[in-house]
Amino acid sequence: MPVEVVTVPCRSDNYAYLVRDIGSGKVALVDAPEVAPIRAALDARGWKLDQIWITHHHDDHTSGVEALRDGAEVIGHGKDAGRLPPLDRAVAEGDRFQLGETDVKVFDVSGHTVGHIAFYLPTERDVFTADSLMALGCGRVFEGTHAMMWDSLTKLMALPPDTKIWSGHNYGQANGRFAMSIEPKNQALKDRISRIEAADAAGEPIVPVTLAEELETNPFLRATETPVKQAVGLPDGDDAAVFAEVRRRKDVF
Ligand code: FE
Ligand code: ZN
């Protein structure tokens, strides 16, 4: 049986997620940016947390963990345990665990931080990517290298095209302006920006988006494509070098 995903907007632009395995009724929280909206989303449905999945150590993803824990199993990257709230289960690249009847696979997608996780549900084709691959963008490379971040993104790019990407933030409009500076003629990008603007105006989440759509519109993933290579002045550059240049340009955009 599938899962149900509830998007919980937190702070100014964070997204937390409730994932409920329908077969068992077990519920996981992906990141804890803020307590009140998450508690309200749980209470409105009569749900209780069985697991908390932490993507990375930044405060806007972890500050609510202790207040929300209440017996839930807290799961995060063993490599970064020293900077995370106390873990009940430490995981690493390639590990699998269960939420009720649903399989969860762990990807190490370091770059934004070293010890950043994406949680992938292979049977559902949902992936919770936080500040690695983001909606129409990618996280700033704070701790890792550009090569590390590109390696992380290529893992996600290899997932099935209909995989749904659940991002850690809504930076959609700002990301759209940057993407247009790289590929002003990309019609799929223009269409996507219109959808983001409409969702924002309606107060609706801009997630999820399929991997296929990210591959058509996201300038960081499109480091593989000739128009993007040309736009950043590296027509013969390899994908990792082009990605690094796109990321550098975004840092100063
Ligand atoms: Fe972050
Ligand atoms: Zn963040």
Image (tube, helix red, strand yellow):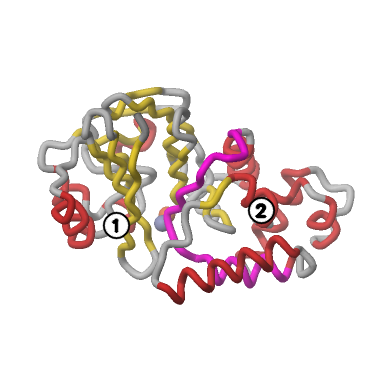
Residue 169 quadrant: bottom left
Residue at point 56%, 71% (across, down): 174
Query: In this rendering, would 237 be left or right of 159?
Result: right
Queried on whether the Cβ of the residue with tag 2 lies below 8 angstroms from ligand 1, the answer reads: no
Q: How far across and down, in percent of the image, does residue 140 sit?
A: 54, 57
Queried on whether the Cβ of the residue with tag 1 lies below 8 angstroms from ligand 2, the answer reads: yes
Residue at point 23%, 29% (across, down): 24
Residue at point 31%, 67% (across, down): 11
Residue at the disc numbered 2: 220
Front one among 190 and 82: 190
| First in residue order: circle 1 vs circle 2 | 1
Q: Is residue 177 above or below residue 147?
A: below
Residue 138 appears in the figure: yes
In magenta segment, residue 162: yes
Front one among 9 and 201: 201
In magenta segment, residue 38: no
Residue at the limit of the structure toward the right, as seen here: 236
Query: In this rendering, would 140 be left or right of 74?
Result: right
Ligand 1 image-quadrant field: bottom left
In the structure shown, which secondary structural element does the residue marked by tag 2 occupy? loop
Q: Is residue 110 above or below residue 221?
A: above
Residue type, label 1: Pro
Mark 1 is surrounded, within 10 Å at the Cα level, by few (under 14), some (14 to 19) or many (20 or more) other residues, namely many
Residue at the disc numbered 1: 33
Query: In this rendering, would 59 be left or right of 115?
Result: left
Q: How far across and down, in percent of the image, does residue 162 sit?
A: 58, 40
Tag 1 near tag 2, CB within 8 Å: no
Label 1, label 2: how many angstroms apart (C-alpha)? 25 Å
Quadrant holding the C terminus:
bottom right
Magenta stretch: give its range.
159-181
Residue 248 quadrant: bottom right
